[in-house]
Image: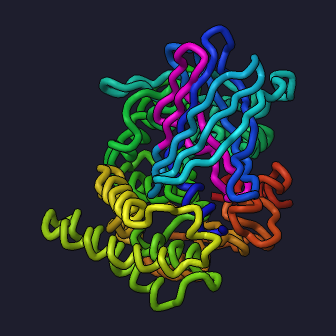
């Protein structure tokens, strides 16, 4: 059961809704899967002709996953989600102004679901408020918020870059808004900040999936240039702060753009995304259901797909190898888990096709084999490197040494801090697993914000 739910976490989802009832808002409910309930939360914005939104799956640590499609037709709604290796759809009918019910489909499996609209939380206190900006860049817009401290004519400026997946400017994950909280703290310390919506999210336009590492880096360059020429702020220093995969983008920009004065890496990778995925797949599939030999073969076949796509050759052979072994893994599942997968060959093929789609995207291709350390070796500015002691996604063990080696090679002043009890989001954690994100306090671990602001002032 656990592994089936893991697959659902990274699936593609859909839904249908009533024409007279606004879909905008928060919808919370459950999928009934073999007698168990999996909580799902949809956060919808916009109008019937132009909806957008995200999906949360708290029990699985799914974090503010963007919907690629949100449509309202009559009394039905369709939401489509693309951010993983499995395809799924929610298709439902609006039973009343506050209730939707229907069927969730993943491959050949179909499961009932119900959603209920939640009360508005518009009255809650807003943090990180500032001046909304739209920064033009070629044929796209970058929407974000500039926060400037009062009575500080020339403050240092922190530009925040979010992690993997298209995220809004707050990096909102289960109502924890790390970038908004950090912006509020920096303001209180006389430090300005700018945080922005990723492409295709909020007020930013353009395609996120088609944005390569170079494209994402050029977005940051455009932000730097615009803010330097803006009447809104005259910064003394430009500081890039990248979280997780955002640290890869920040490191690349900092190594190439001479306007950057400081670099802050929050839970950032020191090795390629391919190596990170190897670790994460090993972690996800471990636990007793699959043998270590099967897990290692799955990873080997997965990486053969990556290489075949990269080289543009022998892809069909790599796909068939993956399908064959994945079918074997599914057939070896306990009967209770296999019951949710009535057509294993079809499911295995769908899984393989999804992997090919994900690994073929321009963004993933640009990141899979990129070595962040090569950028860090070119730095000429001080760097602050932060890890969470309990981070299970980007661990200190895998990433600290390659980052330190690169910074030593660069010969720059750097500081490494490992934050006790902190997870990947720098919240106080129990296990550090993503599955507990939704249940944790919506704040940073004590002292974390001060480490950042004090380091900025000291450098």
Colouring scheme, one of rainbow, by chain, secondary structure, one colour: rainbow
Quarter of the image where the C terminus is located: bottom right
Residue 187 in sight from this viewpoint: yes
* Predominant SS along the magenta part: strand
Residue 218 higher or lower than 16, as above or below: below
Horizontal relation, residue 25 to residue 370: left or right: right
To which quarter of the image does residue 268 belong? bottom right
Residue 355 in sight from this viewpoint: no
Viewer-closest of 90 and 456: 90
Viewer-closest of 18 and 442: 18
The x and y percentages for residue 46 are 59, 18
Q: How many marks?
A: 0
> Which region is colored magenta?
52-81
Residue occupying image coordinates x 81% and y 23%: 120
To which quarter of the image does residue 52 belong? top right
The x and y percentages for residue 103 are 61, 40
Residue occupying image coordinates x 54% and y 19%: 72
Horizontal relation, residue 140 to residue 22: left or right: left
Residue occupying image coordinates x 82% and y 70%: 430
Residue occupying image coordinates x 53% and y 36%: 14
To which quarter of the image does residue 252 belong? bottom left
The x and y percentages for residue 228 are 47, 31
Residue found at the far left of this picture: 313
Viewer-closest of 314 and 74: 74
Viewer-closest of 17 and 442: 17
Quarter of the image where the N terminus is located: bottom right
**Is residue 368 a member of the stretch shown in magenta?**
no
**Is residue 67 a member of the stretch shown in magenta?**
yes
Residue 210 higher or lower than 227, as above or below: below
The x and y percentages for residue 287 are 64, 82
């Amino acid at each position: 059961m656990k592994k089936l739910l893991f697959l659902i976490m990274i699936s593609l989802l859909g839904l249908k809704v009533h024409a007279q009832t606004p879909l905008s808002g928060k919808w919370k409910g459950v999928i009934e899967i073999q007698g168990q309930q999996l909580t799902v939360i949809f956060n919808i914005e916009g109008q019937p002709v132009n909806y957008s939104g995200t999906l949360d799956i708290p029990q699985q640590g799914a974090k503010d996953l963007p919907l690629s499609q949100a449509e309202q037709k009559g009394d039905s709604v369709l939401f489509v989600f693309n951010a993983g290796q499995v395809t799924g759809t929610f298709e439902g009918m609006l039973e009343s102004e506050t209730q939707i019910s229907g069927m969730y489909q993943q491959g050949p499996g179909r499961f009932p679901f119900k959603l209920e609209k939640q009360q508005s939380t518009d009255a809650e206190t807003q943090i990180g408020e500032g001046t909304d900006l739209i920064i033009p860049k070629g044929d796209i817009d970058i929407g974000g918020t500039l926060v400037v401290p009062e009575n500080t004519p020339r403050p240092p400026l922190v530009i925040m870059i979010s992690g993997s997946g298209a995220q809004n400017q707050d990096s909102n994950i289960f109502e924890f808004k790390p970038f908004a909280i950090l912006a509020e703290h920096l303001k209180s310390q006389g430090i300005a900040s700018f945080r922005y919506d990723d492409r295709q999210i909020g007020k930013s336009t353009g395609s996120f999936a088609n944005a390569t590492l170079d494209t994402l880096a050029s977005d940051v360059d455009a932000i730097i240039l615009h803010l330097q020429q803006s009447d809104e702020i005259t910064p003394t220093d430009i500081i890039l702060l990248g979280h997780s995969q955002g640290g890869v983008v920040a490191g690349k920009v900092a190594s190439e753009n001479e306007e950057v004065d400081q670099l802050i890496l929050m839970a950032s990778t020191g090795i390629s995304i391919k190596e990170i995925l190897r670790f994460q797949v090993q972690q996800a599939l471990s636990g007793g259901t699959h043998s270590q030999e099967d897990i290692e073969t799955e990873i080997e076949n997965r990486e053969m797909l990556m290489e075949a796509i990269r080289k543009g050759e022998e892809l069909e052979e790599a796909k068939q190898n993956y399908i064959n072994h994945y079918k074997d893994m599914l057939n070896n599942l306990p009967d209770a888990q296999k019951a949710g997968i009535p057509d294993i060959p079809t499911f295995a093929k769908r899984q393989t096709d999804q992997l090919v789609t994900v690994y073929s995207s321009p963004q993933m291709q640009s990141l899979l084999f990129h070595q962040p350390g090569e950028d860090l070796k070119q730095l000429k500015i001080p760097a602050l490197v932060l890890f969470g002691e309990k981070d299970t996604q980007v661990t200190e063990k895998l990433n600290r040494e390659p980052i330190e080696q690169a910074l030593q090679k660069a010969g720059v002043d750097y500081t490494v801090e490992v934050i006790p009890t902190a997870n990947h989001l720098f919240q106080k954690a129990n296990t550090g697993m993503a599955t507990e994100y939704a249940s944790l306090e919506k704040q940073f671990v004590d002292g974390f914000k001060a480490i950042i602001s004090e380091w900025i002032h000291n450098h």
